[in-house]
Image (tube, grey):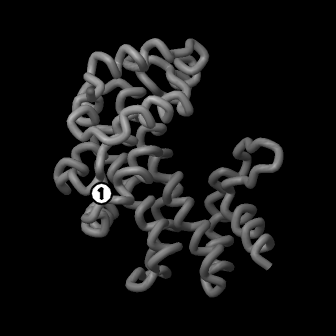
Amino acid sequence: MPMTLNEALAELEALGHEKVRAHNTKNGAGDNQFGVRLGDIRKVAAKIKTDDALAEALWDTGNIDARLLATLILKPKNLSREALDQKVRSVAFVQVADWLNPYVVKNHPDKEALRQAWMEEEQDRWAARAGWSLTSERIVKKPDGLDLPALLDRIEAEMGSALPEVQWTMNFCLGNMGIHFPEHRERAIAIGEKLGLYRDYPVSKGCTSPFAPIWIAAIVNRQK
């Protein structure tokens, strides 16, 4: 039998950890959470597989862990463009955005139309973040039709004053242009140096800094 909403919430609650809750709170989460490890959420999703109705009910709770689970068990193609737009704009925690965008948004049939709309977004940080995330994907996978110099102009003019949630995916666009397009590499690096975002970002040993000049150089060197 399909898992009910109450059963799913009870299972998530039983998997909660105080340390995870504290970590989430430190990173901007509210009180509506259980503090479930991401790997444990994946295990619950594996048991459920796909269940659009349950995913909608989980999302509507506003609970962080429930929303993360919802991103793994719904079929993106079954969401209307309007419903997906609403979901993106209702995000309240960065980890939820970081699962919603790759697992749902990037697999939606109307993602290009949404990308174009979200790239003009001036009021909603989560919609803007999703727009830049989709643009970063296009830079890597399907750049034809994109005006890359104009994107660099926007990044140079806007990224320094953008909200942190938006800066992160704008930075991915900047890095990917420098990595994948040698003709724009020098300018991408110069913009990164000028803005200085993530210059002192802490990274674990063996990981690459998200500071665009370091990131671009590291990936290009690996590809040689």
Residue 21 drawn above or below residue 218? above
Q: Residue at x 30, y 55 (%)?
A: 122
Asked if 24 appears above or below 133 in the picture, the reply is: above
Q: Nearer the viewer, residue 123 or 30?
A: 30
Residue found 21% across the figure and 36% down from its top: 53
Q: Is residue 14 visible?
A: yes
136 on left or right of 127? right
Rendered location of residue 51, percent (x, y): 27, 38
In the rendering, at what x and y percent does residue 106 appear? 38, 59
**Residue at x 73%, y 42% (from the top left corner):** 202
Q: Residues within 10 Å of mark 1 (few under 14, many from 20)?
A: some
Q: Which residue is mark 1?
A: 121
Picture quarter containing residue 93? top left
Residue for point 38% across, 84% down? 145
Q: Position of residue 132 (x, y in %)?
A: 43, 61
Is 89 left, or right, of 17 in this rendering?
left
Give the side of residue 61 with respect to residue 214, left or right. left
The furthest residue to the front: 1
Q: Work out which quarter of the rendered image holds the N terminus and state it.
A: top left
Front residue of 118 and 71: 71
Q: Secondary structure under badge 1?
A: loop
Quadrant including the C terminus: bottom right
Task: Report the side of 72 relative to 90 (left or right).
Answer: right
Residue found at the far right of this picture: 205
- The amino acid sitting under disc 1 is Glu
**Camera sees residue 93:** no
x, y percentage for residue 52? 24, 40
User: Tag count in the figure?
Assistant: 1
Q: Is residue 58 above or below residue 120?
A: above
